[in-house]
Image (cartoon, helix red, strand yellow):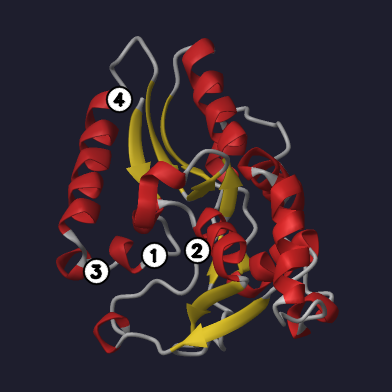
Amino acid sequence: MAASTSYISATSPCSSSVENSATACFSKLVFDNYVRRRASPADSTVVGLRYFNVYGPRERHKGSMASVISRFSYQLQETGTIKMFQGCGKYGDGEQRRDFIFVRDVVNVNLFFARGPARHSIVNVGTGRSSSFNDVAAALIEMCGAGTVEYIPFPEELKDKYQPFTQADISSLRRMGYVSPFTHLLEGIRETLADSGLKSLRQNARMLVGRGFSRDTKLAKSGRICC
């Protein structure tokens, strides 16, 4: 099994414009094509797994490479404010969307291919649903009981390179026989927070309210907590 990337999925510019892609993205695509050429004669499983936005517990050691969900939770714990980019293109402030998949689901997909009969394919490993950064922030703030959102200017150098939307087409994964449901975004966020110390996060919430942070944010009131 080979780890690929969602950046070369059908919803990504990398699949249609390789010459403008990052080197890492291009190298993944080259390897995917190699797998396609070599997989059919193989007697064992040969699959490329295109991971979408994986998140889950114990990501703090990743620093800036941690998932958006973990980074937002750390910001909320430490400052009471979640910072995210203003809008770009046709997407409003915080409305950029990602297909967030819980790490346990990724493990289950890997085990499905590792333990089953020989299979040959390149598949997307996502949920097939996208959620906005605002959705994630609203969920975190509601679970915390306090917090605010700050939209920061979108970097000029990223405007032509940033990927504002990802959503996995998981039809190939389903055709291969994987039928298990995926973890709901809210459930995954709760588990991620619980491992990070949700109890202390709630205590931080009371402290932050005492320091003047709003308990009722616009996002938390909007009801836009979905996946």
Q: Nearer the viewer, mark 3 or mark 4?
A: 3
The N terminus - image quarter = top left
Q: CA distance from mark 4 to mark 2?
A: 27 Å
Disc 4 residue crowd, few under 14, some 14–19, many 20+, Cα 10 Å: some
Q: Is residue 106 visible?
A: yes
Cβ atoms under marks 3 and 1 closer than 8 Å: no
Circle 3: residue type = Ser
Q: Which amino acid, mark 1?
A: Ser
Q: Secondary structure at mark 3?
A: loop
Q: CA distance from mark 3 to mark 4?
A: 25 Å
Q: Amino acid at mark 2?
A: Thr
| Left or right position of 95 against 156 | right
Q: Residues within 10 Å of mark 1 (few under 14, many from 20)?
A: some
Which of the two discs, 1 and 2, labels the residue nearer the N terminus? 1
SS of the residue at dot 4?
helix
Where residue 80 sits in the image (x, y, percent)? 62, 71
Q: Upstream in the sequence, badge 4 or badge 2?
A: 4
Q: What residue would you read off at disc 2?
A: 166
* Distance between mark 1 and mark 4 Cα atoms: 24 Å
> Residue type at mark 4?
Ala
